[in-house]
Image: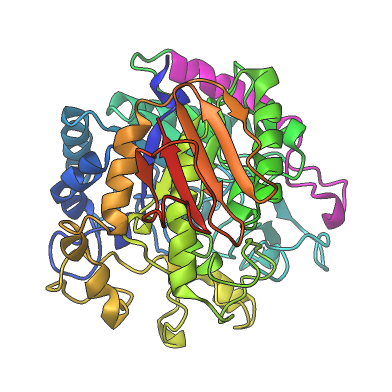
């Protein structure tokens, strides 16, 4: 079986992972030093958020040069050493590719090569399209014309009607494949083709049919290299059937399943999402991909400790009351549920430490363009991007850590068998032996239970402890009088 069909993948937000030179900013040297941490957790691959030269107007998703490394992170030679080091440990490297937009400091934009962008010469706004970060999706050039940016004004959208853009990105793919990367996570994969004949309400910049031709060509390029290289899509689409079209055998290998991430902590809702996800993937023969947190969303320890346990960009519930102990308990059960499901699993750095959303950052330190473009009403995503605590001796970091994060550091948790870190290590060690199709079991309305091969997974979302058919090989919390407590999970082999 291809490695990516059931892979465990660890997401590294490089700027906040590990600082190798003491400047308070994570870098490639820091990641190389900590590769053993990821290997020790049992992961098959690392997905890296953008590491390219960038003014960092949007955390690196404003790329100025797609064939180099941001100097704060290191050099191209450092990147090549990282890929080699990871491969020696049996870890593959997936890098972020940002094909919808670039930085306004990209040479094409700086040099006025306007046919490669969407430019309009009108007095008024060209149309009613809105930026996904707030405000209109158009800004003026110095000559008074308008350019399209679906995100920040510093992120002009490429014009994919121009063949030069196609040729450029095909060359970028080859550039990194030649350096040994094992795949690409494609940012805003649904957004490249636009229909300017439609109003904003019809989402004319998302999921247009022409986008699939781009990925068929990319798949041919990736498949021409040895080593089972992959394409992973990021698409927030409401229709599971249209979502699955990106996963046809000649397009992408897998894509993030955000319905699961957004789902509230509710047995019926979770079962519905699992069933609909499996049903959508089956006709195209693609594996589902499960994820609980990432660099864009409120960390799930925080979400699960709230009255509303789901996630929505429209309402991040910033500052809503949170029961941290309850959120942590549910997060422990959630990773056991997630890792037992068929398909691939992504883990966002820090969730193995039980880190929570840092919501009390000083406003003057917030960098997310969402904060600025929303008129300082949406506090954005900085709270899930605070650098990881490695030990009590960590130096200063570009975003300040909460004081008590020292108690949640890797050093503090490593030898504690009851820690979140120890649970993650055990979960991903055992996950390698799980195989087979999912078969639901009926253990009650508020209990999720299923078999996969020789494993039975039970998640108790009810208010009362429940009996188990036999002694579990692993449970998210200790059993009480032989029963599985509320908001807990067990694996029975």
Residue in the foreground of this view, choosing between 17 and 204: 17
Query: Which x, y percent locates residue 95?
Result: 38, 40
Task: Write the residue at 60% across / 16% down.
Answer: 249
Question: From the image, which quarter does the N terminus lie in?
Answer: top left
The quarter of the displayed image where residue 189 is located? top right
Determine whether, in the image, residue 256 is placed left or right of residue 389: right
Q: Is residue 49 visible?
A: no
Determine whether, in the image, residue 411 is placed left or right of residue 95: left
Q: Is residue 244 magenta?
A: no
Determine whether, in the image, residue 239 is placed left or right of residue 254: right
Q: Is residue 26 visible?
A: yes
Residue in the foreground of this view, choosing between 85 and 430: 430
Q: How many marks?
A: 0
Residue 334 higher or lower than 159, as above or below: below
Residue 322 higher or lower than 354, as above or below: below
Task: Write the residue at 59% across / 55% down.
Answer: 461
The quarter of the displayed image where residue 425 is located? top left
Residue 28 higher or lower than 25, as above or below: above
Question: From the image, which quarter does the C terminus lie in?
Answer: top left
The quarter of the displayed image where residue 22 is located? bottom left
Determine whether, in the image, residue 136 is placed left or right of residue 48: right
Stretch in magenta: 194-223
For the rendered model, the colour scheme is rainbow
Query: Which x, y percent locates residue 45?
Result: 33, 35
Residue 406 higher or lower than 116, as above or below: below
Residue in the foreground of this view, choosing between 158 and 51: 51
């Amino acid at each position: 079986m291809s490695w990516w069909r059931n892979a465990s993948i660890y997401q590294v937000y490089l700027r906040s992972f590990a600082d190798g030179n003491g400047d308070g900013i994570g870098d490639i040297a820091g990641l190389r030093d900590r590769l053993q941490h990821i290997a020790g957790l049992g992961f098959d691959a690392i997905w890296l958020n953008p590491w390219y030269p960038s003014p960092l107007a949007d955390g690196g998703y404003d790329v100025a040069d797609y064939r180099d490394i941001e100097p704060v992170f290191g050099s191209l030679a450092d990147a090549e050493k990282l890929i080699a080091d990871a491969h020696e440990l049996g870890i593959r490297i997936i890098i972020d590719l940002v094909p919808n937009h670039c930085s306004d400091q990209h040479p094409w934009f700086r040099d006025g090569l306007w046919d490669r962008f969407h430019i309009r010469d009108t007095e008024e706004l060209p149309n009613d399209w809105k930026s996904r970060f707030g405000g209109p999706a158009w800004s003026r050039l110095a000559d008074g014309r308008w350019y399209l940016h679906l995100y920040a004004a510093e992120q002009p959208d490429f014009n994919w009607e121009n063949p030069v853009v196609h040729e450029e990105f095909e060359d970028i793919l080859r550039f990194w494949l030649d350096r040994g990367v094992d795949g690409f996570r494609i940012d805003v994969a649904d957004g490249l083709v636009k229909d300017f004949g439609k109003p904003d309400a019809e989402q004319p910049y998302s999921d247009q049919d022409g986008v699939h031709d781009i990925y068929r060509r990319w798949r041919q390029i990736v498949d021409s290299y040895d080593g089972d290289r992959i394409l992973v899509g990021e698409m927030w689409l409401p229709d599971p059937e249209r979502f699955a079209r990106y996963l046809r055998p000649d397009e992408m290998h897998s894509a993030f399943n955000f319905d699961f991430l957004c789902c509230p902590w509710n047995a019926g809702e979770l079962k519905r999402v699992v069933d609909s996800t499996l049903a959508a993937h089956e006709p195209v023969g693609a594996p589902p991909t499960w994820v609980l947190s990432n660099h864009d969303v409120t960390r799930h320890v925080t979400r699960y400790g709230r009255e509303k346990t789901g996630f929505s960009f429209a309402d991040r519930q910033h500052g809503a009351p949170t029961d941290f102990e309850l959120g942590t308990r549910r997060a422990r059960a959630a990773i056991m549920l997630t890792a037992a499901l068929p398909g691939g699993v992504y883990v966002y750095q820090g969730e193995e430490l039980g880190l929570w959303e840092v919501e009390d950052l000083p406003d003057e330190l917030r960098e997310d363009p969402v904060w600025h473009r929303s008129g300082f009403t949406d506090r954005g995503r900085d709270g899930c991007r605070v650098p990881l605590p490695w030990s009590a001796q960590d130096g200063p970091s570009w975003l300040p850590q909460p004081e008590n994060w020292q108690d949640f550091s890797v050093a503090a948790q490593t030898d504690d068998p009851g820690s979140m870190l120890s649970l993650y290590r055990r979960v991903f060690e055992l996950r390698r032996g799980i195989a087979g199709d999912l078969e639901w079991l009926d253990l009650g309305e508020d209990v999720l239970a299923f078999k996969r091969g020789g494993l039975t997974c039970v998640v108790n979302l009810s208010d009362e402890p429940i009996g188990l058919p036999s002694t579990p090989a692993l449970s998210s919390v200790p059993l009480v009088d032989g029963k599985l407590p509320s908001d807990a999970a067990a694996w029975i082999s």
